[in-house]
């Protein structure tokens, strides 16, 4: 500001060197600019040809959450993860398998073989198989086999049938045993789904915070443009009055030059403020709409008012809320739980394979001729139904991997991953505590700054009135009055900036303690 004032004074001094004095240096008393208190109204005569779109902050949030492409992309991740879980759960599906095989063999006769003829083997199998969550594999089914041997002369030499029904079980006793091991992939994918959900919540929170902070920037920009325009109008009125006084000989040419310089400078400030508003308007439209072209010619008018009253802040409550609600912290906890799942799984993979196997069933064996094929089969099925010929087996299969390098490497990897996840959780906890404290300090400082800025504005208004009284008495100059008017405008702009910063600090605190969605009235339902 000092350099700016010196530049204006130098220009005025150079102009005075060739203009000379033409009368007493006086200017008419101009009332001070009315304080900007109407937050949320469109700036005076700004974009009068553009259609206005009046939006509250909650309407902007609703539009942003519906239209934001990043959120649209992120919200699909939990759904994709849920589909992966469904696919992984298929490991415990029951499989039904049925097959029928017809094999025919024509052979020549020989000294050590049966006479020339044909052999037909028909096999029918049906049954169910699957795996249980504790690792048990099972196979229950029915097997029917028919063998028919016929000579080239048509004589049936042999017919036999071998029906059998039974169940075969294999139960791991070491490696692969237990619910935790066999549901490993499902539980990992569930944690991945929960993590993706936390990431989606975090994206929504950040989007809401960005929309709210940009909304308060719009409020500030609109008020800043209005303040700068009022400042231009005030300087222009002063210039018009100076010209009238100059025509009647009661004002010097120097006073006109001073007023013209001030008008030019304030018009530059207005142009710069308008540029910033237009840039923020374009960026804000992208936040709340997928089709920015449809809003290109619209002027977004913020309806809500910025808060200027200090709100009570309890940092301890905010820290507690942050540890309960922050999705980053919850995500770190889920990652730690996921690492523990991996550790348990790979600890089990260090064990040898010890599988208990067993089977139990019923069979029947009979022979006959082709003419008694199906009646004989019926007799066989009756034998199975009556349990006349039970069959069973039991055993243990032990497999010991020598070295087991892969399993040991994976186990060590996830042991270290658990340690890393614990440190990440602790760091996130510290970041939340420090971040909430910093945000709370910022809110308190901005609340005090508003009071300070308001006091500065009030004192500048009083200074301007006093200087105008001095000007009436001929004890001041045009340059001094215009400078105080400019300082008053700067004070009002600084007050508007403090109000915007305070509201943005409240948004940042709500983001840091995880209450921003509740504060904005946004509820997220899991898909």
Image (spheres, rainbow, N blue to C red):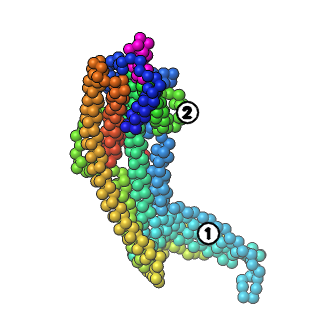
Quadrant where the N terminus sits is top left
Q: Which mark is residue 453?
A: none
| Contact check, label 1 and label 2, Cβ < 8 Å | no
- Mark 2 is surrounded, within 10 Å at the Cα level, by few (under 14), some (14 to 19) or many (20 or more) other residues, namely few
Q: Measured from the top left, where is residue 470 in percent x and y? A: 27, 22
Identify the residue position indicated by label 1 in the image. 123
Q: Which residue sits furthest top? A: 248
Mark with earlier residue (1, 2): 1
Q: Quadrant of residue 380?
A: bottom right
Identify the residue position indicated by label 2 in the image. 293
Q: Compute the Cα span from label 1 to label 2.
A: 71 Å
Q: Main secondary structure of the magenta part?
A: helix
The one nearer the camera, 79 or 309, is 309
Does residue 389 appear anywhere in the picture? yes
The kind of secondary structure element at disc 2 is helix
Rendered residue at 22%/40% (across/down): 312
Q: Bounds of the magenta span?
A: 235-255
């Amino acid at each position: 500001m000092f350099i700016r004032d010196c530049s204006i004074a130098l220009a005025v001094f150079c102009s005075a060197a060739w203009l000379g004095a033409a009368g007493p240096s006086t200017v008419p008393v101009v009332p001070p600019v009315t304080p900007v208190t109407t937050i949320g109204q469109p700036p005076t005569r700004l974009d009068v040809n553009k259609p206005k779109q009046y939006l509250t902050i909650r309407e902007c949030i609703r539009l942003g959450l519906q239209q934001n492409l990043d959120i649209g992309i992120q919200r699909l991740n939990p759904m994709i993860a849920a589909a992966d879980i469904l696919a992984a759960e298929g490991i415990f599906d029951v499989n039904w398998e049925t097959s029928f095989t017809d094999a025919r063999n024509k052979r020549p006769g020989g000294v050590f073989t049966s006479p020339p003829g044909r052999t037909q083997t028909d096999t029918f199998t049906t049954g169910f198989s699957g795996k249980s969550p504790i690792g048990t594999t099972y196979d229950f089914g029915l097997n029917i086999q028919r063998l028919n041997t016929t000579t080239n002369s048509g004589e049936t030499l042999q017919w036999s049938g071998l029906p059998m029904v039974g169940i075969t079980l294999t139960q791991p006793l070491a490696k692969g045993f237990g619910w935790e091991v066999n549901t490993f992939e499902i539980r990992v994918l569930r944690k991945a789904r929960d993590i993706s959900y936390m990431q989606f919540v975090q994206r929504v929170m950040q989007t809401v915070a960005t929309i709210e902070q940009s909304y308060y920037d719009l409020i500030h920009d609109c008020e800043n443009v209005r303040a700068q325009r009022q400042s231009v109008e005030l300087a222009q009125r002063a210039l018009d009055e100076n010209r009238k006084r100059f025509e009647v000989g009661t004002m010097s040419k120097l006073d006109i030059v001073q007023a013209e310089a001030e008008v030019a400078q304030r018009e530059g400030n207005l142009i710069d403020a308008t540029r910033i508003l237009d840039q923020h308007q374009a960026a804000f439209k992208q936040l709340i709409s997928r089709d920015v072209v449809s809003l290109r010619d619209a002027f977004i008018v913020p309806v809500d008012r910025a808060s200027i009253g200090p709100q009570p802040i309890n940092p301890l409550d905010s820290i507690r809320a942050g540890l309960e609600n922050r999705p980053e912290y919850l995500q770190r906890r889920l990652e730690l739980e996921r690492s523990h799942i991996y550790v348990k799984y790979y600890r089990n993979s260090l064990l040898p394979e010890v599988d208990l196997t067993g089977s139990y069933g019923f069979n029947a064996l009979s022979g006959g001729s082709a003419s008694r094929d199906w009646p004989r089969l019926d007799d066989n099925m009756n034998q199975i139904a009556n349990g006349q010929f039970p069959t069973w087996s039991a055993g243990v299969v032990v497999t010991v991997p020598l070295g087991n390098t892969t399993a040991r490497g994976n186990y060590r990897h996830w042991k270290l991953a658990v340690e890393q996840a614990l440190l990440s959780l602790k760091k996130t906890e510290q970041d939340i505590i420090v971040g909430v404290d910093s945000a709370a300090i910022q809110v308190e400082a901005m609340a005090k700054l508003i009071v300070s800025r308001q006091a500065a504005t009030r004192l500048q208004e009083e200074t301007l009135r006093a200087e105008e009284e001095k000007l009436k008495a001929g004890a001041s100059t045009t340059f001094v009055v215009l400078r105080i008017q400019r300082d008053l405008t700067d004070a009002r702009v600084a007050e508007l900036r403090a109000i915007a910063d305070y509201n943005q600090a409240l948004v940042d605190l709500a983001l840091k303690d995880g209450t921003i969605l509740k504060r904005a009235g946004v509820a997220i339902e899991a898909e």
